[in-house]
Image: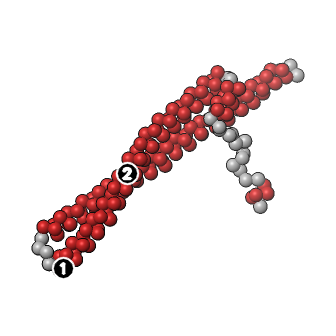
Amino acid sequence: PELQEEFGYNAETQKLLCKNGETLLGAVNFFVSSINTLVNKTMEDTLMTVKQYETARLEYDAYRTDLEELSLGPRDASTLCRLDAAQANFQAHRAKYEKLRADVAVKLKFLEENKVKVMHKQLLLFHNAVSAYFAGNQQQLEQTLKQFNIKLKSPGADKPSWLEEQ
């Protein structure tokens, strides 16, 4: 009974600390998830397209060289057949190369724009959440999460219920 009031204050402080910590953790997890998506999905997709573009460029150059060599040679029946086939291969690979070149340009432009937007938004979220947390401002911390449309899971939400485990 002597320290009941002090223990009560301590318990309330611990509850607030836990609640604020979970809210901050939600903001940090959202930050990490968004950056992870940018790096491991968007950038990776762009890099894969660039690699496909490089391969298409090599194939295009190879078929162009074949066509040029056949065009310089003698013109008999077998050469004309091979020339037609080389021309068809060249056109197909040129179309593939040009499509991938356009895809790379679009993806690089999108990546540049998206990278700046995502990083700006995420750094702002991170700064605001950390500032509110260390200022002890629960309302500002929750408002930051609302501003960025972050829904927090309640503790234990990832755990299946007793019924789901059966």
Asked if disc 1 and disc 2 are in contact, CB closer than 8 Å, the reply is no
The residue nearer to you, when weighing 9 against 85, is 85
Q: In this view, does 25 lie above or below 47?
A: above
Q: Is residue 79 above or below residue 37?
A: below
Q: Is residue 3 left or right of residue 129?
A: right
The residue nearer to you, when weighing 101 against 119, is 101
Q: Is residue 165 above or below residue 159?
A: below
What residue is rendered at 78% in x and 55% in y? 162
Q: Where is residue 17 shown, x and y percent of the image?
A: 70, 28
Q: Earlier in the sequence, mark 1 or mark 2?
A: 1
Q: Where is residue 23 shown, x and y percent of the image?
A: 67, 34
Q: Is mark 1 on a helix, strand or loop?
A: helix
Disc 1 target residue: 78
Disc 2 target residue: 102
What residue is rendered at 20% in x and 66% in y? 66
Cα separation, mark 1 vs mark 2, equals 36 Å
Quadrant holding the N terminus? top right
Query: Residue furthest toward the bottom?
Result: 77
The answer to whether residue 58 is visible is yes
